Amino acid sequence: MALELDDVKRVARLARIAVTDEEARSALQQLGGIFSLIEQMQAVDVSRVEPMSHAQDISLRLREDKVTEDDARDALLAVAPEVEAGLYLVPKVIE
Amino acid sequence: MHDATIKHLSDALAARRCSSVELTRQFLDRIRSPGAQYNCFITVDEERSLAEARAADALRASGQAGPLTGVPLAQKDIFCARGWLTTCGSKMLSNFVSPYDAHVIERLRTAGAVTLGKTNMDEFAMGSSNETSYYGPVRNPWNRDLVPGGSSGGSAAAVAARLAPGATGTDTGGSIRQPAALTGICGLKPTYGVCSRYGMIAFASSLDQAGPMARTAEDLALLLNGMAGFDPRDSTSLEREAEDYTRSLTDDLAGLRIGLPRQFFGDGAAPEVLAAVEAALAQYRKLGCTTVEVDLPNMGLSVPVYYVLAPAEASSNLGRYDGVRYGHRAKEYRDLVDMYEKTRAEGFGAEVKRRILIGTYVLSAGYYDAYYIRAQKLRRLIADDFRQAFAKCDVIMGPTSPTTAFALGAKAGDPVQMYLSDIYTIAVNLAGLPGMSIPCGFDGRGLPVGLQIIGNYFSEARMLNVAHRYQQASDWHRRTPPGCA
């Protein structure tokens, strides 16, 4: 997997992290080393193996459809950067 | 009192030989001096701690005290604690005063434990040396020019320097065990699902686990009793009968089969580390145990597998830091996307950004099967290797870390070198097994060596027993760093 500068910039966009050209170049170098490490995975035959996401074979627990949470709105709004009338404020997204 | 174990302090509090306020004051004094030089704490709030101590003393006076009531503990700054600044070692949360308690914190609070402060850690738990923290590196109490390990470096150093009798930590790829090994203390990562992750700032959800750090196996058991338990708010929390993790501490070890994986005793570890581990194994044979070689053939892939899965999960978890609801927000931006991009560029450090980029890449269209799914399949092979090994033995042992503590800055330039510090610990997280590290000796420079004990699922009580009996026959766990006595 040969990483290019454009890949780094594309991925940074997907991850919503601003990177300067210089940062992208430095990231490319370091990521190259890490991707060489990851390439070692390709050596093994896993065609007959099931993916494992959890150690115990559990399925998602369900609960009754009843309101059990307390109203923590004020406490949660108190830690936000910008709020008004109980709403989070962000830059306009609609043209 | 600062050299006393949690067990000793608990007994002293119960016998009214001291109060929680007195104990808390003593530890707060030590955090100031000699503690300041190690940079173990991000937040100390003496008034808040003393208020908790007074409440603990009142709880005792009303006859409702338990084993942890009034015991002062350091809390890793990854746990949300109501009213406390909770930074996760990052600029991104440098202004975040948590409005709620993590389940683990809530349990310890209800038990009457006192929070001494929030300990320093690698940013968002990503690191093996506590050098990526926005708040500066933690220094190893055994030698200030060396790292304490990470990511729970602050908690480990605080316990080693006798600034706290115990601490909470978290372990995703070794972050409790490796710093415990490098600072000469004990740390345990329980079976995945035993401690609730609610309120524990998420790094890699299928790997993260909270666990205790202290100076003896008995203390780990007392803390684990306080931390473990089902929580419906964590979808991966396991509903099981409550256990008393102290119940087997003094059981006889005769006949215990210790598995020694070939892969742990090759040339990956420093000779002095292996020598200390071999000496510990000789001690275990004297206690009546037998050793048997086991094989973990896919172990060598655990680092690459982890560095696909953990960054992938992290890229998803850290997507929530967007400057909208909490945490850092950029001051100037053109539009919403620009706000996101600048907030995240400013708020995250270099290692965190690196891992988010890796994770985003391996999850992106066209690469998901080749990287993420393949890693999950290899994960199953690694877990199956352990399953097969446990058919031949009761516990597995080996070195926790390939080396003793290394110099600050020594590995910071090469991420892959840093990642290889976790070579013996990572597979345990991938499999979801319980693992612990206890001190077993020193190298020629006087630096601690850790012995890793890996158990089968839900065998924590047995593992603590295995550690406790060794600690009754040895005294590595009682050694003190210079200047910390």
Image (spheres, rainbow, N blue to C red):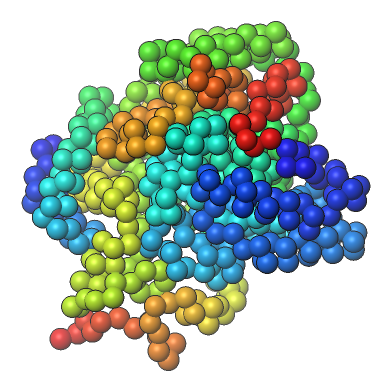
**Is B254 positioned to the left or the right of B40 in the image?**
right
In front: B182, or B106? B182
**Is B67 positioned to the left or the right of B450 in the image?**
right
Compared to residue A78, the image places residue B257 above or below, namely above
Residue sitting at 84 percent across and 64 percent down? B58
In front: B293, or B337? B337
Say which quadrant the C terminus of chain B sits in.
top right
Residue B408 falls in image quadrant? top left
Say which quadrant the N terminus of chain B sits in.
top right
Q: Position of residue B186 (x, y in %)?
A: 61, 33
Compared to residue B441, the image places residue B87 above or below, namely below
Residue A50 falls in image quadrant? top left
Compared to residue B71, the image places residue B102 above or below, namely below
Q: How many marks?
A: 0
Q: Position of residue B76 (x, y in %)?
A: 55, 51
**Is A81 positioned to the left or the right of B341 in the image?**
right
**Is B192 positioned to the left or the right of A9 in the image?**
right
Residue sitting at 90 percent across and 63 percent down? B62
Residue sitting at 32 percent across and 38 percent down? B412
Q: Residue furthest bottom?
A: A85
Residue sitting at 40 percent across and 74 percent down? B325
Q: Position of residue B224 (x, y in %)?
A: 67, 43
Tell me if residue B339 can be seen: yes
Tell me if residue B208 can be seen: no
In front: B307, or A58? B307
